[in-house]
Image (cartoon, rainbow, N blue to C red):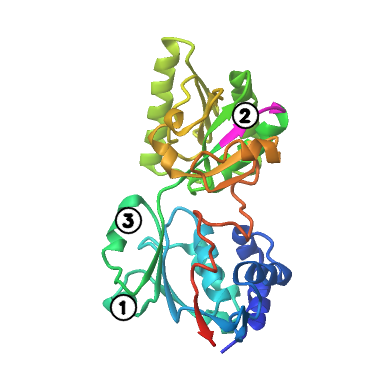
């Protein structure tokens, strides 16, 4: 049985490898100490009974966590497993039947003491469900509903369902376009933190033009993944339908990568939020004077992150009425802080229970 301090050092060592750091960001032992202290009150909370008013209290980690992860990116899988390892739980990770090589291959860089706490499954047996104290599920709304049917009353269920993210640009279009191209293009737009649309104040069509330039630059240095036949067909259909709409009026305008399907920018004068077909296709829309859930439409309830530029406290607070759980600087949408509340959950505090003496 390792202590929290020992696990912190082991996780920091693992996250120093490039194959893991590209998904987790730069995580240091100092960061992990601060994270545990921030959520549990002390970095000794899992190892000893500590004063809690008139009581002595200790955080108790679940013996086993079942992580059911999606296959769109490895980002969420690494986030979830690091949380489980940090609190010292045994972790069963259900990956998609098609695999998740970026995650499973990188596990070889975890020290033995951590790998002993991880089991990988491509399918689940009854005992995998029954032994779990906590079930963390990441996937579509349909997948979450199906998983929920397996959850027993004594098990804690933490769902992370379908989410979308957007950007808002108030000023400084040139710099904003650089940041936005990154947030749209990373992981080929397949994650919950990928931007589907960007709202621009003022001349939004000019911003779309600048974004198209930066999308091309990003594509040159960070080539897009190979598309399936279905994905390629979807993008071609989107482009054709957009061309048709643009020929009938100025409400819609298309920018596209030449001789490829690498990226697509669509300026749409309607403020209603539309879902991108992914793979670096993004909508640019004029920012209305009052951006609210009624204007955003049915996808508003699925908002995860709003990335804004320029990022100021005033701009961020002005958006707190929207249901997004995170408001961050544009360009950092895909790199949440270790301390973020994932879909509104405190990631470590939500996993533990407390035992009191006194």
Residue 295's place in the image compared with 1, above or below, is above
Marks 1 and 2, the one that precedes in the sequence:
1
What percent of the width, then of the height, locates residue 205? 59, 19
What percent of the width, then of the height, locates residue 49? 60, 86
Q: Which residues are magenta?
A: 167-173
Name the one closer to the observer, 264 or 324.
Answer: 324
Q: Which mark is residue 211?
A: 2
What percent of the width, then of the height, locates residue 66? 40, 72
Disc 1 designates what residue? 130
Q: Is residue 146 visible?
A: yes
Q: Dot 3 lies on which element?
A: helix
Name the one closer to the observer, 312 or 160.
Answer: 312
Q: Dot 1 lies on which element?
A: helix
Q: Dot 2 lies on which element?
A: helix
Residue 217's place in the image compared with 98, above or below, is above
Q: Nearer the viewer, mark 1 or mark 2?
A: 1
The quadrant of the image that shows the C terminus is: bottom right
Disc 3 designates what residue? 143
């Amino acid at each position: 049985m390792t202590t929290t301090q020992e696990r912190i050092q082991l996780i920091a060592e693992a996250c120093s490898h490039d194959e893991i750091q590209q998904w987790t960001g730069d995580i240091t032992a100092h960061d992990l100490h601060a994270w545990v202290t921030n959520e549990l009150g002390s970095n000794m909370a899992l190892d000893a009974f500590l004063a809690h008013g008139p009581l002595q209290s200790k955080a108790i980690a679940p013996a086993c966590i079942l992580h059911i992860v999606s296959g769109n990116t490895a980002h969420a899988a690494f986030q979830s497993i690091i949380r489980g390892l940090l609190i010292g739980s045994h972790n069963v990770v259900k990956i998609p039947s098609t695999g998740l090589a970026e995650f499973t291959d990188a596990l070889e860089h975890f020290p033995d003491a951590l790998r002993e706490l991880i089991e990988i499954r491509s399918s689940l047996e009854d005992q995998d469900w029954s032994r779990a104290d906590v079930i963390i599920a990441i996937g579509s709304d349909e997948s979450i509903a199906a998983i929920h049917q397996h959850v027993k009353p004594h098990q804690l269920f933490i769902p992370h369902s379908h989410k979308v993210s957007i950007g808002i640009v108030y000023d400084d279009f040139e710099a904003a376009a650089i940041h936005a191209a990154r947030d749209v293009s990373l992981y080929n737009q397949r994650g919950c933190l990928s931007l589907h649309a960007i709202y621009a104040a003022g001349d939004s069509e000019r911003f779309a033009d600048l974004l198209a330039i930066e999308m091309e630059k990003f594509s040159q240095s960070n080539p897009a993944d190979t598309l399936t036949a279905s994905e390629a067909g979807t993008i071609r259909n989107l482009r054709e339908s957009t061309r048709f709409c643009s020929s009938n009026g100025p409400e819609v305008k298309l920018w596209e990568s030449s001789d490829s399907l690498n990226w697509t920018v669509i300026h749409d004068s309607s403020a209603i939020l539309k879902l991108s077909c992914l793979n670096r296709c993004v909508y640019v829309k004029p920012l209305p004077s009052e951006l609210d859930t009624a204007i955003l439409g049915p996808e508003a309830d699925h908002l995860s992150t709003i990335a804004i530029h320029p990022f100021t406290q005033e701009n961020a607070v002005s958006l707190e009425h929207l249901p997004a759980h995170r408001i961050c600087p544009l360009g950092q949408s895909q790199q949440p802080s270790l301390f973020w509340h994932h879909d509104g959950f405190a990631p470590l505090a939500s996993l533990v229970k407390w035992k009191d003496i006194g």
